[in-house]
Amino acid sequence: MRKILLPALVSSLLTPLWSAQAATTVIVNSSAPVSNQIMPQLRATHGTLGTLLSTATQIGSAVTAGNDKIAAMIQQSNENMQHYATFAQQARNLEDARRTYTVPSSICSESASGQASQISRQASAKQGKLSGGGGITNQQVKEQIASPAAPDDDQFAAATIRGQFCTAEDVEAYGALCQGISDQPGGDRQVRSVLYGAGEEEKAPELTFSPAQTDAAMMYMKNSARKTAGRPLRKEEVNSDTGRQYLGQTTQFEAIISAAEQPQLAMIAASQPNEATKAVLAETLNAASSKAWFDQNGSEQAKRTGMMSLREFEAFEVQRRYANTDYLKDLQEMEGDNLLRESIRIQSLQNALLLSIKQQLQENAILAGQQLSIAATEHYQPRLNATLQHLTTGAARE
């Protein structure tokens, strides 16, 4: 390097002299300025350039790495957005499926309606049993229901049985006739025995009767509707013409009495614990709103036996909706198809109740027709007999 630069430097210094005289070859072995000043500067410059190159390389690498990171972050962000959009769509699909297909916890209380017909049939079947004295635990009341008696005997027995249903006023008035103040005062002569169950005057209404309440209700039915107009015939009396006429009259009378007692008998039968409600009630009470209503309003008999009567079942189906704030909370949480289904169930319940009202109106129409028949018979029979007698007398004269 020195050998190259030194001739060049000398040449540049001597250029003006060449133009004035002939060139002379000069050999320079060393130069202090080159060695001491130029070469160190060149070496420093070379080091600086190397440092700059290294720095530029590092900067370029850092920029490239930063760009890669930014690209990776953008890609990750896009992937995250795609995952979020997918998750949000799945959540919406699941929520739509829940609203459409999920069965609410209150469905247990809806299954009760599927047993309504069976419960009603069993209640109707109990009417014949009660009419013959079945299901009555009080022996005296059972005999009064099952065994027809002459009017005097019937009235005497009614007075004797009244001693089992004495009020405080009865005890004071009748003394020894009463067995003390009854747990069901007035049960044999107060209509609330049939409507709400016999018991203390301030007791809450009950739609499922205990055995004792059933006895009181049947005795009220006997006193108010199953009257006795004549004594039963003996076998030897039936064979005569008068006996047959008497039997025909009692048959007609008993037919009317059967109609008169039917509404009460049907209500007492519908107030008996019904076996068909046992499984239904156990399942229905799994729903918190239904259990809350039952715990507060269910009859003691239903709570003790786990069975409701037809009347209490119908009240349960209606009131656990209409008069139950827990159900209203369930209703507010329903939406979509579940809310639509609940509306259909309510409409179906209303239809069932309307059908029951229709059947009751039909029964009332039958009773009204029988009352009209009695009134017509009482009005026309004396007139027809008088006309027939006049006609017979006139024919005899001719």
Image (tube, rainbow, N blue to C red):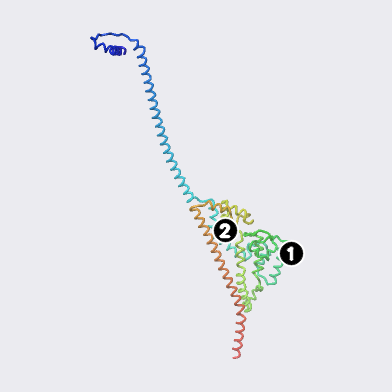
- Against 23, residue 197 (above or below) is below
Tell me where residue 68 appears, x and y as whole percent.
Answer: 40, 32
Compare residues 27 and 100 and report the one nearer the observer.
27
Give the farthest residue toward the bottom: 398
Q: Left or right: where does residue 158 sit relative to residue 345?
A: right
Earlier-in-chain disc, 1 versus 2: 1
**Residue 318's disc number:** 2
Q: Position of residue 318 (x, y in %)?
A: 57, 58
Task: From the image, tell me which residue sits under label 1.
Answer: 169
Q: Secondary structure at mark 2?
A: helix
Q: Is residue 354 above or below residue 41?
A: below
Q: Residue at x 61, y 82 (%)?
A: 383
Q: Where does the image place residue 361, in percent across and percent down from the top left?
A: 56, 68
Mark 2: amino acid: Val
Asked whether 218 or 199 is in front, the reply is 199
- Cα distance in 3D space between marks 1 and 2: 39 Å
Crowd class of label 2 (few under 14; some 14 to 19; many from 20; radius 10 Å): some
Seen at 45% across and 44% down, the residue is: 88
Is residue 298 rendered to the left or right of residue 344? right
Mark 1, secondary structure of its residue: helix
